[in-house]
Image (cartoon, rainbow, N blue to C red):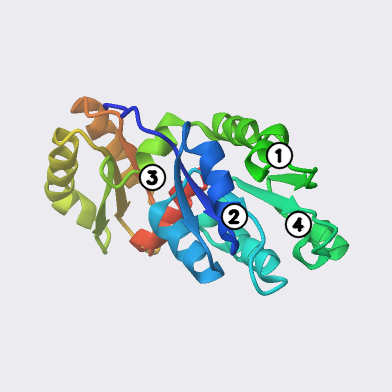
Amino acid sequence: MEIKNIKNKILVIGSEGGFLSSVTKLLETDFEVITAKTGDEALSSARLSRPKALVLGFLEPRGTSFSLHQKLRSGWITKHIPLIVVDVQNPAEPQKSWSQEEAMQMEADDYISIVPKGDMNLSRLLEAGGLTETIRLRLQKKSNLLKAAILDPDTFCITWEQIPGRGAFEIQQEQVFDNVIQAASGGKVHGVSVTDNPGGNPALSTEMICAQIKKANMEPVVHLAVRDKNRNTIESMLYGL
C-alpha cells in the first residue's frame, strides 16, 4: 500500500476572522488548514473532511463553543479526532473566555490559554503557547498505519454478506470468497462480515474464511464476524480500534 506524502488536515473553528487568519498563518506551513465559522459548519466539515485535529476558538453566541465541543465528543466520527481548545482570555472581552463551570466539564484533549500582551500578534502568541507542537504531539500519539488505511475510503472496503440459515455459508462460500479476491486484487484492505447462522455463533464462519484468506495469501485483510450490522455501524466499530 502506497502512503502518500501529504499534509495532515487541521480544522480551525472560530467566529472571528482575526482568530482564523492568525491560526492559519501559524499552521499552514506544516498542515493543510480548513476553517469553519459556525457550529453547524464545523460539525459538517469535521464529519465530511475527516481532519486529523480540531482547533476550537470562540464562537458566537456565548456558549456555542462549549455546546459544539460536547457534540464533537459525542459523535462516533468526531469523538476520535484530537480536540485542542484555544481560549483567548482578553480582559476587555471576558464573555469570550470559557467559564469556570465550562472548564470543569471540558473534554478536550488539550487546552491552551492565551493572554494578549501589548503589540504581540495572535500568531506569535499561539506559537509561544505551543499550538503547533501540541498538534504534532497529538498526531504522533494517534499515528496508526492500519487505522489510516481502514479510515481511507480509497483503501478500505467492506463486502457485506448476510447469509441466513444453517449451512448456507458452505453453500454460498464461493460467492463470498470471489468477492474477497476481487477486492484484494485491487490492492485494498478488505473487511468481510459473514453470518452463517443468525441465531448462533459465527465462530465457524470466522475460522473457515480466515483459513481461506491465508490459503489465498491475500493479507492484509480485516475480517469481521458480526450479525445484523449495517455499514455505518461497522465503520463506527472500526473507527474505535
Residue in the picture at 60% in, 34% down: 132
| Mark pair 3, 1: CA separation | 34 Å
Q: What residue is disc 2 on?
A: 18
Check whether the beta carbons of the residues at disc 4 and disc 2 lie within 8 A of each other. no
* Earlier sequence position, callout 3 versus callout 1: 1
Q: Residue furthest bottom?
A: 61
Residue in the picture at 38% in, 49% down: 225
Q: What residue is disc 3 on?
A: 151
| Mark pair 3, 2: CA separation | 33 Å
- Expressed as whole percent of the image width and height from the top left, the position of residue 116 reads 78, 47
| Mark pair 3, 4: CA separation | 27 Å
Badge 2 amino acid: Gly
Q: Residue furthest front?
A: 119
Q: Secondary structure at mark 4?
A: loop
Residue 34 vertical position relative to residue 6 in the rendered view, above or below: below
Badge 4 amino acid: Met
* Image depth: mark 3 or mark 1 in front: 1
Count of numbered badges drawn on the protein:
4
* Image depth: mark 1 or mark 4 in front: 1
Badge 1 amino acid: Leu
* Earlier sequence position, callout 1 versus callout 4: 4
* Image depth: mark 3 or mark 4 in front: 4
Q: What residue is disc 1 on?
A: 125
Q: Residues within 10 Å of mark 4 (few under 14, many from 20)?
A: some
Q: Secondary structure at mark 1?
A: helix
Between 235 and 89, the one nearer to me in the picture: 89
Q: What residue is disc 4 on?
A: 106
